[in-house]
Image (spheres, grey):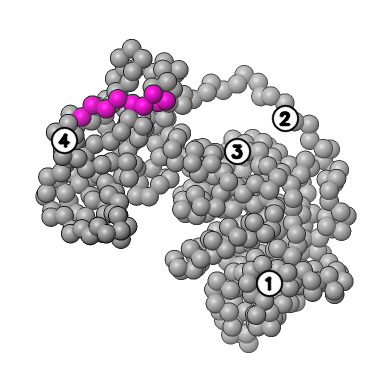
């Protein structure tokens, strides 16, 4: 268990590709952090720098107060589970989980205890004698996680661990990871491109785009107070509707005007805009589909139905309004049944002032949260332990070894029949960066 600190971390590949920059994050001990963003935004690179699988071009990374920039992966006391996890096909589930502990010459009794405990946690105790080819995708993923759990690492790193599973299994494994988190009380950094996964798993979410952190916050914070248009659009499903609208200031009150409707912003929003001395201006107005309500009132935005989708607990109504597509989510109560609305049906909708998000037209920044000016000089970081000093709570043998089969480096397709499989004699054979030499 350990906190982490990433300070001004930057990664440039091949002197040309800037994959990550200005990455600053303090992660508390036992916190569950999710890095999320579209493909190519730098999530995996960040995780791999924490793991020690990529050099850091600039900046510093501390794990448990120890600077690890030059510490090899096996000495960082971390465990990593990859998207393309690899299991040793010729070994049973038991031996796959036990392998790293055997390498580290743990006593048999201790190994047995740890393997059975991990299997219990992951609900695979019945499968310990099976070989990987006799397991489902979800079960194999549990074995890969089991192999990481028994190491009792200070930090658990997971890189899209569920993305190879089908949708149903993914949902199931997502709740398994939530449970796992209760049982394995350690620090997690989890990478995903899936915002639902991020929202359900993270204590805090780091949203990234083009190598830059866009916002760090709890799921509530990033949903209700998106820092910019990108975060507003990325978090939440269906996506937030974005309109061209007008923000008007009248003394200490603010209004937004959209398609003839004028709505006063909530007291909290007005207070924040006032604090930033925001003036009347054209804005990008963000309204979540679930915050739009159909109304009979004349004082409303007029729209016409394009299509309505019955989702069971709600109807998603796609309408044309203000010259664009707009989605309205209408929740249904248990008795309510609804017909699909006919195409072209005129409807009206409205929204409350607490639901309106106003963004700068040029920069996309949320006008409630003005960008802070860059500090002249960065505050000195909290004094870290000297680079070479091991963390106080890390026993020598814990620091001595670390193993995880890295399929990222050497994919071993577990689906293939055993006879056709390359059989690695040890992690070194498959380029395992976490292995003991
Ligand atoms: P993500 O995990 O968010 O999909 P990555 O961290 O894998 O993104 O990649 C970030 C950027 O760095 C991308 O533009 C990607 O093409 C580039 N990149 C990743 N790995 C390498 C590499 N080994 N060499 C050169 N460029 C790389």
Q: Viewer-nearest of labels 1 and 3? A: 1
C-beta proximity under 8 Å, tags 3 and 2: no
User: Is residue 399 rendered to the left or right of residue 140?
Assistant: right
C-beta proximity under 8 Å, tags 3 and 4: no
Mark 1 or mark 3: whose residue is earlier in sequence: 3
Mark 1 or mark 2: whose residue is earlier in sequence: 1
Q: Is residue 140 above or below residue 33?
A: below
Q: Residues within 10 Å of mark 2 (few under 14, many from 20)?
A: few
Q: Viewer-nearest of labels 1 and 4? A: 4
Q: Secondary structure at mark 1?
A: helix
Q: Viewer-nearest of labels 3 and 2? A: 2
Of 275 and 42, the residue lying toward us: 275
Region in magenta: 261-269
Label at residue 297: 4
Q: Which residue is mark 1?
A: 119
Distance from the alpha carbon under mark 1 to that under mark 3 = 36 Å
Q: Secondary structure at mark 3?
A: strand
**Residue sitting at 23 percent across and 51 percent down?**
317
Rendering quarter of residue 288: top left
What residue occupies the far bottom of the structure in this picture?
419
State yes or no: residue 18 in magenta.
Answer: no
Distance from the alpha carbon under mark 3 to that under mark 2 = 14 Å
Q: Viewer-nearest of labels 1 and 2? A: 1
Image location (x, y in percent) of residue 182: 64, 56
Label at residue 171: none
Instruction: Kindly tell me whether residue 150 is visible in this rendering.
Output: yes
Q: Is residue 195 above or below residue 18?
A: below
Q: Residues within 10 Å of mark 1 (few under 14, many from 20)?
A: many
Mark 2 or mark 4: whose residue is earlier in sequence: 4
Q: Which residue is mark 2?
A: 381
Q: Is residue 221 above or below residue 43?
A: above
């Amino acid at each position: 268990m350990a906190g982490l600190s990433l300070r001004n971390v930057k990664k440039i590949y091949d002197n040309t590709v800037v994959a990550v920059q200005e990455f600053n994050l303090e992660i508390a001990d036992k916190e569950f952090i999710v890095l999320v963003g579209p493909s190519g935004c730098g999530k995996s690179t960040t995780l791999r720098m924490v793991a020690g699988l990529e050099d850091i071009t600039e900046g510093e990374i501390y794990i448990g107060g120890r600077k690890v920039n030059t510490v090899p992966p096996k000495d960082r006391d971390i465990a990593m589970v990859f998207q393309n996890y690899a299991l040793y096909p010729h070994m049973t589930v038991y031996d796959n989980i036990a392998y790293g502990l055997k390498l580290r010459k743990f006593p048999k009794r201790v190994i047995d205890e740890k393997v059975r405990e991990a299997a219990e946690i992951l609900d695979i105790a019945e499968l310990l004698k099976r070989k990987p080819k006799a397991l489902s995708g979800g079960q194999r993923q549990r074995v890969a996680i089991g192999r990481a759990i028994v190491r009792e690492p200070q930090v658990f790193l997971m890189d899209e661990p569920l993305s190879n599973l089908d949708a149903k299994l993914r949902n199931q494994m997502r709740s398994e990871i939530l449970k796992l988190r209760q049982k394995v009380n350690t620090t997690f950094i989890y990478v995903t491109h899936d915002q639902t996964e991020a929202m359900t798993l993270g204590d805090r979410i780091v949203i990234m785009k083009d190598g830059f952190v866009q916002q760090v916050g709890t799921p509530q914070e990033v949903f209700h107070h998106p820092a910019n248009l990108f975060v507003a659009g990325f978090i939440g499903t269906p996506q937030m509707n974005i309109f061209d609208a007008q923000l008007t200031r009248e003394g200490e009150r603010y209004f937004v005007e959209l398609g003839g409707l004028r709505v006063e912003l909530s007291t909290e929003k007005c207070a924040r805009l006032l604090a930033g001395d925001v003036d009347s201006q054209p804005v990008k107005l963000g309204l979540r589909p679930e915050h739009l309500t159909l109304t009979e009132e004349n004082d409303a935005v007029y729209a016409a139905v394009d299509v309505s989708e019955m989702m069971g607990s709600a109807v998603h109504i796609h309408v044309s309004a203000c010259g664009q597509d707009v989605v309205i989510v209408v929740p249904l109560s248990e008795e309510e049944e609804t017909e699909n609305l006919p195409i072209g049906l005129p409807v009206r909708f409205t929204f409350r002032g607490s639901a309106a998000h106003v963004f700068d037209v040029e920069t996309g920044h949320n006008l409630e949260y003005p960008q802070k000016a860059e500090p002249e000089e960065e505050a000195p970081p909290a004094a870290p332990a000297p680079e070479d000093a091991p963390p106080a709570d890390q026993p020598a043998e814990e620091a001595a070894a670390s193993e995880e089969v890295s399929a990222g480096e050497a994919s071993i397709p577990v689906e293939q029949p055993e006879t056709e499989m390359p059989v690695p004699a040890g992690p070194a054979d498959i380029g395992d960066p976490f292995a003991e030499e």
